[in-house]
Amino acid sequence: MKKRQFLHALIGASLIGSAVLSANVQADALANAEKSGTLRIAVPQDFPPFGTVGPDMKPRGYDIDVANLIGRELKLKVELIPVTSTNRIPYLTTGKADLVISTLGKNAEREKVIDFSSAYAPFYNGIFGPPDIAIKSAAETAGKTVGVTRGAVEDLEFSKIAPATATIKRFEDNNATISAYLSGQVQLIATGNVVAAAVNERTKIRRLDTKFLIKNSPNYVGVNKGEGALLAKVNEVIAKLKKSGDLNQVSQRWLQAPLPADL
Amino acid sequence: MAYAFDFSSVLEYREALLAGTVKTLGLTAVGAVCGLAIGIFGAVSRAWRLAPFDRIFTAYVELIRNTPFLVQLFFIFFGLPSLGVQINEWQAAILAMVVNLGAYSTEIIRAGIEATPRGQIEAAQSLAMSRAQLFRHVVLPPALLKVWPSLCSQVVIVMLGSSVCSQIAAEELTFAANFIQSRNFRAFETYFIVTGIYFLLAIAVRQAMIQAGQRLIARRAR
């Protein structure tokens, strides 16, 4: 009997102890990282062009470049931790990573759990088309044929704002929409900037330039709650990278487009 | 387990369904008339070895009957513009259906022509009929009459196959169904109704074909 009580007490104490310890770890991630000299950053490895595994089996992509740039600015060694979209926030909240740079969009639910830096990457749905069609708003698509993938977010959103004289052609899947554009069956298409970047990277038949945005959801760096010092530092670095043009280079490299001015 | 059906959310889109049905019927009508015309020409070319058409039609029949309809459609819609031939989704859909039905009906009608008894042709020749007269009055009507049930089936098959044209954004019946269920997320009800419409359409088309066969061919064949 006594032995069991003692065991319970021991387990309880160790649980509390570890909780306190991990709370300590979380309390000042910046100081800890500076002490150890490494910053642990969760990055995607299955989401091109933000994060993939290169031919050399090393992670590469927009998010990885940003992670390395932040490490460079903070003068810390970067330890990349590959995550998936489902476990990226748990990795942060359980203290396995100091930052999440993993194509993370901001919403109210997530803001209850973690803090967000300023935006570091554009991520949006929009209308794309060739350089010679100069339009800047939904109203100007009047009289044009626009290809969309049926039932996708951009279909639902663009259908609401499209003028009556715009012809919307709805295709079965992304590939058919892109083929319709490349073969000249439609003048413009509605799709995501990441899709457009992938198309521009692989083919030079017909360029896809952003005409206007339909739905905007840029990416942010995720930081644990209560890490004010780290968050301030990350924001400072992102502002600096935007100003220096480093971030623009990353955007050009992976998204084949300059960083939007209003990001 | 009990699934709560909600057909009203589909019927809100009845205009889209009606427009799709009309387009499907239109595609079928144009496809059937032009496809059968090609079929008759192809059949006589092959059965009577009319050079050079017999060779051309043999290649055409083999090519079309040994490739999927969807691929033929994509070839026309995505392929031809890359070669500089501008073609919209309806032109592509009609062209694909005509070309497809043309190949199948060539073979079906050829079977009818080749089944013409030798004696009938000799009898016509002994009456000093020209080859064209012989074909028009003696060979073609009985041949069509013999294979008419097969042709009816083939036209119905092509009509049902036209659902594939939704893939190139031709807004026919299946396109309407896909569109509706991408808006109301009631896939079961939507396809339930569209299945019913296709079923009725198929019966109607078959009946119309049988009637047309009796009026246009049966009288001349006797």
Image (tube, rainbow, N blue to C red):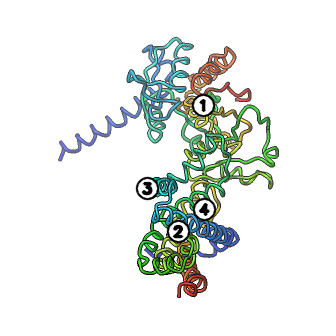
The residue sitting at 48% across, 39% down in the picture is: A85
The residue type indicated by label 3 comes to Glu
- Give the Cα separation between the discs numbered 1 and 2: 37 Å
Both labels 1 and 2 in a single chain: no
Residue holding disc 1? A200
The residue type indicated by label 2 comes to Leu
Q: How crowded is mark 3: few (under 14 residues within 10 Å), some or many (20 or more)?
A: few
Both labels 4 and 3 in a single chain: yes
Front in this rendered view, residue A81 or B65: B65
The residue type indicated by label 1 comes to Asn
- Give the Cα separation between the discs numbered 4 and 3: 30 Å
Query: SS for tag 1?
Result: helix
Both labels 2 and 3 in a single chain: yes
Coordinates of residue B172 in the picture (x, y in percent): 63, 64
The residue sitting at 71% across, 50% down in the picture is: A158
Question: Hey, which residue is sitting farthest top in the picture?
Answer: A75
Sequence-wise, which precedes: disc 2 or disc 3?
A: 3
Coordinates of residue A148 in the picture (x, y in percent): 64, 49
Residue holding disc 2? B160
Residue holding disc 4? B175
The residue sitting at 42% across, 72% down in the picture is: B114
- Give the Cα separation between the discs numbered 1 and 4: 29 Å
Both labels 3 and 1 in a single chain: no
Judged by depth in the image, the label closer to the viewer, 4 or 2, is: 2
Front in this rendered view, residue B39 or A208: B39
The chain under label 2 reads B
Front in this rendered view, residue B173 or B183: B173
Residue holding disc 3? B62
Query: SS for tag 4?
Result: helix
- Give the Cα separation between the discs numbered 4 and 2: 13 Å
